[in-house]
Image (cartoon, rainbow, N blue to C red):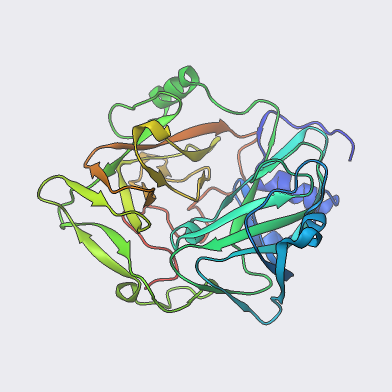
Amino acid sequence: MTDENYNDGVLPAQAIAALMDNGAISGADSARLQPASLDLTLGPRAWRVRASFLPSKKKTVKDRLNDGLAMQAMDLSDGAVFERGCVYLVELNEQLQLPDNVKGAANPKSSTGRIDVFVRLVTDHGAAFDEIPAGYEGPLYAEISPRTFSILARSGSSLNQLRLKAGRYRLDDAALEKLHQSSALVEGSADISGGLGLSVSLARDDGMIGWRARRHSALIDVDKVAALDPNEYFEPITAPSAGFIILDPDEFYILASKEALCVPPDYAAEMTPISPGLGEFRVHYAGFFDPGFGWAETGINGSRGVLEVRSHDAPFVLEDGQLVARLVYEKMSARPEQLYGADLKSNYQGQGLKLSKHFR
C-alpha cells in the first residue's frame, strides 16, 4: 500500500471508513464503526490451541498452527462454546493493507472485559500482542481465553476493536496538564504523571461498591443484550467498614473509579496498568475510551471508569482511593463526525458501577 497523507493522531471513524472504501481494510462492516475505532468480528474458522503464542517475525500464524499448536479445528458458522480455562485462536473477518504511515492497536471491547474474557489480537510475523506495524498487509486473528465464564460466540460476533494511528499522537504530561486546564478531564485536581491517574472507589452512599464473579455459572451468549440476571453470575460487594477489601487470587472483581472523567471530542484515551511495583493486581482488560466519553458541552457528565480487577498470586489489600490505573490521552487526527454517546447507542455513557451489556 502506498504512503498517504494523514494528520498526526488517531484516525476517526470517517477516515477508517475511507480505508474500507479503498480496500485498505477488507471484510469489515461499516455498522461496526465507533468514533475512533472499528469493532472486529469473528470469522467462521477457529482452533483450540495448546497454549497462547506469538508467531515471531519469521512465521505466520498458520505456520505456528501447523507446528503442532492446534488441537482442534472449530466451525463458528452456527456458534461454538469457548470454555473457561482454555485458549482459542479465531481468524477474523477483517484483513488489512495499511498505508505505510498508519499502524494499529487493538483491545478487548468493554463488554468483553467485563465478563473476564481475555482477548488479544495476533498478526502474521507478530512479535507482540495487540500491535499492528505500519504498512501491515495480511490477516488478523483473535486469541480468546475465557477466565471465569464460558461463552457462546459465532461468526460475526465482536469481542475486540481496532484503533488506527498516524505520526505523533500521545500527549506528554505537560500537554495533558494543559488540556486539563482548558477542558477539565476530572472534577477537581488531576493526578498527572505518565497519564491521568485513576483511583478505586470503595465507599458509596448506597453501600454497594462492586461485584465479585461467581464460579461455575451458566454460559454467556456474547450476542444477547440484557438477557441475564446479574445475581446468577456475580455477588454484590458492600462498602467495607475498614475502608479496604482483600482481593483473593484468581478471583474477578468489577469496581469503579472514584473519579468521574471525560475525553474531549478531539482526543481519545486508553487505560494502562500502573507499575507492577505498586500492587499485585491487574486492572482493566478493555482499554479504549472514545472521543466524547463522559463529555458534555457543559463539562463532565459523570462517567466513571469501570475497573476489571484480578489479583495475581497472593491476596492483596485494596484501599479506598488507592491508585489503580492511568489514562493516556492521544490527539485525534480529526474530530469524529459522531461522538461517543451522541446519536450513538453507547452502552456506557454516564456510567457508574455497571456490568456488561449482557446483564439486565
Quadrant in the rendering for residue 68: bottom right
Residue 134 locus on image (x, y percent): 77, 36
Along the line of sight, the residue nearer the viewer: 230 or 267: 230
Residue 144 locus on image (x, y percent): 59, 61
Is the C terminus in the top left, top right, bottom left or bottom right quadrant? bottom left
Drawn side of residue 90 relative to residue 284, left or right: right
Drawn side of residue 319 relative to residue 184, left or right: left
- Picture residue at 30% right of the left edge, 34% below the top: 187
Residue 66 locus on image (x, y percent): 81, 61
- Picture residue at 44% right of the left edge, 66% below the top: 357
Drawn side of residue 250 relative to residue 169, left or right: left
Residue 5 locus on image (x, y percent): 80, 31
Drawn side of residue 70 relative to residue 268, left or right: right
Is the N terminus in the top left, top right, bottom left or bottom right quadrant? top right
When the figure is inspected, residue 28 is found, relative to residue 331, above or below; the finding is: below
Q: Residue furthest bottom?
A: 78
Along the line of sight, the residue nearer the viewer: 290 or 214: 214
Q: How many marks?
A: 0
Q: Residue furthest front?
A: 68
Along the line of sight, the residue nearer the viewer: 63 or 97: 63
- Picture residue at 79% right of the left edge, 49% below the top: 124
Q: Is residue 147 visible?
A: yes
Q: Is residue 43 visible?
A: no
Q: Residue furthest right?
A: 2
